[in-house]
Image: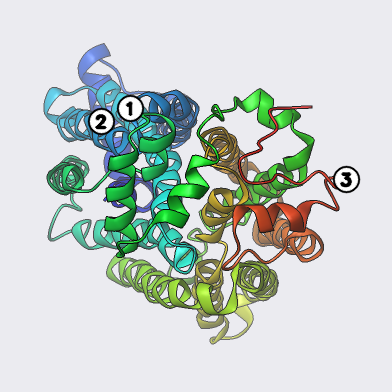
Amino acid sequence: CSPYKLLSHIPLLSLYFQYIKRFYNESWERRYGRVIDEGTLTLLWSITVSIFSIGGLVGAIITTPIVKFFGRKHTLLINNVFAVMAALLMALCQLAGSFEMLLLGRIVMGIDAGVSLSALPIYLSEISPKEIRGALGQVTAIFICIGVFTAQVLGLPEIFGNESRWPYLFGVIVVPSLIQVGILPFLPESPHYLLLEKNDKSGAEKAFQTFFGKDDVSHELEESEAQRNVKLVSVLQLLRNRSVRWQIITVIITMACYQLCGLNAVSIPFQYVACNGSCLLLISIYMFSYLTVFIIFHFSGLAVERLGRRPLLIGGFGLMVIFFAVLTVSLTFQNHAYWLPYLSIFCILAIIASFCIGPGGIPFVLTGEFFQPSQKPAAFMIAGTVNWVSNFSVGLLFPFIQAGLLTFCFLVFAVVCLAGATYLFFVLPETKNKTINEISQAFAKRNKGKSVAVGKVLEGS
């Protein structure tokens, strides 16, 4: 349910921005007795869009000390406080006539998202057997997809997508938060956290037995015991550690490509190819696109343990390059043939599907697989920071790129995807069914032979 709460993020502001802008204008006029000028309105709208990423960055930064002190499970539980606060602020903003409540709600929801997308992958990577580690890692992306699709349905004009009820859609975030609060207490804490931080061997054994579904977990306990005396490394220590240098570089590049690959911007062409259609057609295309996301994510979650991380990630970025190129051509010449707008729609759906094949979830999986448990909080903090800074950059710069390059703007994303695929082809080893020690050995040559043996974490050199 943690990623499901992100349903308030991307599609709603794009589809129903006219209601929010009108609310800003009315609130401003009621308060100051004059209509807001266009420049100020544009600035408020830009802040509304980008402030979510700022909150996400804050959430990613504070995750490391929180998961160390409270544990993985309790961090996710406490994080629901941010979600409920954000839901109330955004749902009641129109009733209170305060656009500041919407802005504050967006940044608080961003904090919730930042913590969720950092703490949840840590938790999943520490409770999953290596045989299903990749598939379980895709759960984050799958539930984000389900959340966005749910938002599309609830955002229809007949439900919440109208001028009088749009704020209440943000209040729906309370529902998955309550579900999480009701279910999560019955799940065990991360066995690694129990053993390494709380010295609770009995609790760790029970947690391993629950999550792994077997009575004999002596091997898992031995692996964790080997790291008992290892303290959590800081971000600075991890960055200085030459034995994981290329793992860090790979995480940074994959997380940057995850946001800079153009998925958030690819919804823009819908408004061009459907400009002669109805609003219902536009919304239907959006809904169908995210239904496509859900289906592809479901099958990619199964394929990731059969085919591996490397081919799905490289193949996903490679396909996005091809479809971005075709999309650019079809948008440029769409008035020359009646069928070109349909080709554009196909390319958009194909880009979304290609993203789902690997780039949509595997970067989070790799971050959990590359590092020792003592290094994971710092690693996910780095990954989260790159993720949210890249997200903010896209939201801030893409309008200017689009205005300058017009239909050729999508070639920028094609270049990003091509660069990411090329790097991963030459650097990324396959991690399927491998232990942390085996993955470290695969990177050892690039790290000048300094691999990290289990239980021997170098804190920086």
Crowding at dot 2, Cα within 10 Å, few <14 / some 14-19 / many 20+, comes out as some
Tell me if label 1 and label 3 are in contact, CB under 8 Å.
no
The spot of residue 436 in percent (x, y) is 61, 53
**Front residue (pair 258, 352):** 258
Label 1: which residue? 70
> Where on the picture, by quarter, is residue 49?
top left
Q: Is residue 50 left or right of residue 161?
A: right
**Front residue (pair 332, 390):** 390
Could one spot residue 16 in this view of the protein?
no
Which comes before the other along the chain, label 2 or label 1? 1
Q: Secondary structure at mark 1?
A: helix
The amino acid sitting under disc 2 is Ile
Seen in the picture, residue 385 relative to 340 is either above or below; the reply is: above
The amino acid sitting under disc 3 is Lys
Q: Which mark is residue 448?
A: 3
Q: Which mark is residue 78?
A: 2
Could one spot residue 375 in this view of the protein?
yes
Q: Which residue lies at the image location 22% right of the left edge and 42% below the top edge?
A: 170
The amino acid sitting under disc 1 is Phe
Which comes before the other along the chain, label 1 or label 3? 1
Which comes before the other along the chain, label 3 or label 2? 2
> Where on the picture, by quarter, is residue 9?
top left
Seen in the picture, residue 68 relative to 18 is either above or below; the reply is: above
Crowding at dot 1, Cα within 10 Å, few <14 / some 14-19 / many 20+, comes out as some
Q: Secondary structure at mark 3?
A: loop
